Image (cartoon, coloured by chain):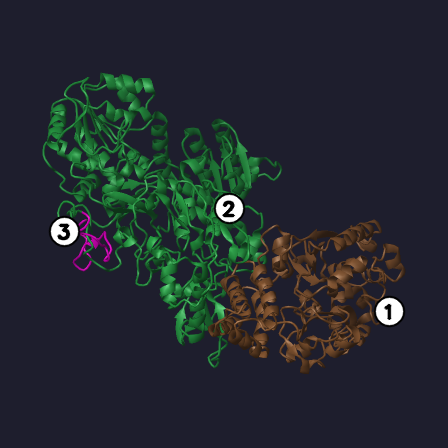
Chain colours: A green, B brown
Amino acid sequence: MPVIYIDDQPYEVAAHHNLLHACLGLGFDIPYFCWHPALGSVGACRQCAVKVFRDEHDRRGQIVMSCMTPVRDGLRLTIDDPDVRRFRATIIEWLMVNHPHDCPVCDEGGHCHLQDMTVMTGHNYRRHRFAKRTHRNQDLGPHIHHEMNRCIQCYRCVRFYHDYAGGKDLNVFGAHHHVYFGRHESGALESEFAGNLVEVCPTGVFTDKPARRYYARKWDLQSAPSVCGQCGVGCNVLFNERYGKLVRVDNRYHYEINGYFLCDRGRFGHDFVNGEERIRRPLARESRGASLRETSADDALSRATQAVAGRRVIGIGSPRASLEANFALRELVGADSFYLGLSDAEFKSANLSLALLRELPTASLHEIETADAALVLGEDLLTTAPRMALALRQLARRQPTAESIVACPVPEWNDQAVRELVQQQKGSLFSATPGPTKLDEDAAAVYYGELDEIAGLGLAVAAAVDQPSAETDSLATQIATALRNAKRAVIVSGGNEAVMQAAAAVVRALRRAGRDAALCLTQPEGDTLGLAMLGGRALSEVVRDGAECVIVLENDLFARLPEADATAFLERTKTLIVLDHSITRTTARADVVLPAATIAESTGTFVNYEGRAQRCFSAFAPQPDVRESWRWLDALRSSLFWPTFDDVCRAMAQAVPAFAKAPDAAPSAAFRQIGNKIPRQSPRFSGRTAITAQLNVSEPKPPDDPDSPLAFSMEGSREQPPPALIARYWAPGWNSVQALNKFQQEIGGPLRGGDPGVRLIEPEAKP
Amino acid sequence: MNDRPLTGRMHPDRTPLSLREYEQAGGYQAVRQAVGRIAPVEVMNLVKESNLRGRGGAGFPTGVKWSFVPRGAQARRPVYLIANADEMEPGAFKDRRLLEGDPHQIIEGVILASYAIEADIAYIFLRGEYTLAARRVRQAVAEAYQAGWLGKNICGSGWGLELHLHTGAGRYMCGEETGLINSLEGRRATPRNKPPFPQLSGLFGRPTVVQNVETLCNLPHLVTHGAAWFKELSRCKDGGTKIYGVSGKVKRPGAWELPMGTPIREILEDRAGGMRDGVHLRAILPGGASTEFVTVDQINMQMDFDTCQAAGTRLGTGMMIVLDDQTCPVGMMLNLERFFAQESCGWCTPCREGLPWIVQSLAAIEAGRGEPADLDILEMHTRLLGPGLTYCALAPGAMEPLHSGLKIFRDDFERHLREGRCPWS
């Protein structure tokens, strides 16, 4: 590894990095704006200037932009030199010429990279005495608030939106100091990944519009690490709460899965937590025909207990409930009476997925991004697993890069130069879907057909992989050749059995040919695969059999069964007990409704499409009558067995061999850092006594959390927690999300201590 | 004619030479001589030997520039040659004369340069406002295709060249070679970082050479008459002639082809006829708007790359702007900086934010609302908008007249501040 000298001290750094990346990785603070670890360098903002020296005798040196300077052995530089410090402060002074300085009313205030960098450079006195230029803002739709006057023209937004995510409707307009970042006219942003602008923008040009309603600063948010349940990818998120409301969902970095970016469904799709439809009190009805009325938890529980006692009870689980909740239901009703709350198609697809994942290796999103070829069979990924589509787009951009930079050596981080070399070349990404999808434009070849035709194409590819022939130039041969030529290939499918089998056949054929190939099967919901691993009967059986008493866990049967079947089944059911967080057509027919905590208020384990168990922690304590589903279900049993989350998780690990490693997904509640729990609130959390001042001016005791090593408090360990317990990104001088640099082993690499979660499925075929 | 190869055969009435007239005057002889008969690398060596330096402003040796283009099997095809005809430097109008007066000459230059670097496709990137030049060049290109000077298998050599005329949409940045390339690709005219240099990854990511019109126009003559002849034309060690121009309050503003290294005094007095009656020379921007001022005592300076550099300025385009004593130097600099601020592409911070601040400060001083601290702000910018600190050369170029202007016209600045008005108004 090359050695560079920073202020005459030697440091070993990786050869393929730029100087900024290397210095940040060593823990030095260099201010920057336009550089982003996932977007590379373009040298626009000129903020990351350092001084390099020709040799050890050169004392004059030369100012260079560290982001555009490759690391080389023996390079000598200083970050802390009066010339370069003055230059960096002047960059901020220039950026501040037109910045409105509206931090007190700006939603970015408190987690603003521009604020951090301003303080870091030491610029504080305004010399510009003339009028500022101003812009008109646009309405960018329900998710993103636009405030162009704050813009510092780092070009990150368009580079992410346009180049990285393939969006078409955000661009840069105008020139000189009038450059404008927005749409050609007001209108909702079209990209599925537009929400990332909130985190990509170093200041408050693009802010989270739903979060604006709550007027909360980052330091006033109570936060916890969690997992998005909107699809089966299992992106890591941070839920942030204030005054009992979920304020904002932020990306939580996971090297193997979502990296720096979320899809908009994950970021903006959790409003149900604050929704009007929430069930916040237990409900019960006196008799069939009477209406549901609010009741006490004790009353609801005793009614439910009576209904359950001595009768044949069946339980219907849910792919959106945690493993522990499903397990608790299965324990309550017995394995024979436990039904997976999946539609027929979902049931078949989930069980087939499980069988295939046990046979063949799969790939994380990071492994998809860095693969050399991919084939998508049957799935419109921007609908079913958007973040995976973004990963495949990176594959398509990256693969020709690797070839081009051999022909004309350019460092991979030199984003503009790389894109210039690559031009319109597309990587070996192939897509076969029933109709056009947004991924098509990234694909080298596209096929449209019925699902059975797509399965046929898959099988033809598998056959062509087995028997390569140069003669035919069919699409199948073209795909097979690209897959065979790849060092690592990924086949993506899901949903339909025949198509999934065809995808598996391609992977098997590639592996027979000695190639490294992986199978990625999308899952529709956060815990679909976990539910299949837990095991249970098909919902269609229960429709046939009927039952006296049914417990439905966080599920709406009308979404899983044909309308007539669901109606008939519920009519035949004598007692219906439903646990859910929001009103559904099923809760409307229940005899007893137990209010369940949402994912943002509960601790649980979810299994993503790769079979990775991940822990989510409650960001805030649920209201008194709202409980985690596993708690309600535990209370329905004859005695209390599981006082805490760890008890139910451990019981599950013992009872279900597939989940033996599930407790390892995150540290248990007993975990302490230097004797302390990990605080969910920042040390600057303010207004603790004011929050409930209309009731009581004294500070209330924070709720206990027996279920996790996190505390509903600002007190606790100030050390960097283990990766599964990171509740916010903050480091001295780094209040913005860019503080993430300080949490990674290397910039853009895995988190310190390893990325959280644990893979539960070991395929027979070793990769 | 031989001492004015570029302009000597042009019609005095400024109508263009037709293909026939051009060929009769010896046009396309160089193509006939070189293409298929001399190896491309020999053409390049000839140009190296002649000490031809780029006439666009930077003065980079042309042959050396070409030598970085990968050849043969190494080259990723197509290889491009671009004639930079986006003449937009304030004060410059030399390329326009060449394009309008003798359009076949530039085409022949393009063919020879393309042959030397083994290019497949060439573009003439023409400033959008040069509509007359566009018409004439377009017609000349059509004629050249017809006559077989362009297209496949030129002179039976097996080598062919496609030439396209592209008219720009009007940005100063398009005159910067990488900004030009981006614009030609249909992108915003922002410059690119170097390395990689265009010779390795230029237009559409392929090897590309961008060359100024005047540079290219030298090639037919150079190839026909040889390097020794070419060097003889000059009065300094750089070969050839140079089109010098003068604008400002002189008797006969204009442009003239003279030996490289002609002193300012000769150009100003013999050609431009000296200052108009009643006005006196104060200073000169020798190479256009983005060069340092020279003062009256430097009037005997030879106008060539090295002499100008030694004198602390640059030859630039060789198109002088003359400042007289009836014109406010602050107003002149305000005018120039307003142009540069307007033409900044908005990519890098110092240029995008610094130039408008300079304009605001100069405007305040000029309007009598200046403050002493404004001079410090201006001075800071001349240091911090320096080469390497900004993304491209636009802002450093914009700082050159301001840098020397602040020194030479210090008293004038201070009078503005003291009197609270422009003394010339």
Quarter of the view holding residue A568: top left
Q: Pointer 3: what residue?
A: A699
- Nearer-N-terminus badge (2/3): 2
Q: Pointer 1: what residue?
A: B1
Quarter of the view holding residue A139: top left
Amino acid type at circle 2 is Ala
Q: Pointer 2: what residue?
A: A396
> With respect to residue A104, does A647 lie above or below?
above
Would residue B29 be found to the left or right of residue A379 on screen?
right
> With respect to residue A241, does B288 lie above or below?
below
Q: State which chain disc 3 sits on.
A: A
Nearest-to-viewer mark from 2 and 3: 3
Q: CA distance from mark 2 to mark 1?
A: 59 Å
Q: Are marks 2 and 3 on the same chain?
A: yes
Amino acid type at circle 1 is Met
Q: Is residue A673 magenta?
A: yes
> Secondary structure of the magenta portion, mostly?
loop
> With respect to residue B16, does A764 lie above or below?
above
Q: Is residue B218 magenta?
A: no
Task: Write down the region rendered in magenta.
Answer: A669-691
Where does the image place residue B63, in percent across and percent down from the top left? 71, 68
Q: CA distance from mark 2 to mark 3?
A: 55 Å
Residue B236 in view of the camera: no
Query: Quick one: A766 or B77, which is closer to the camera?
Result: B77
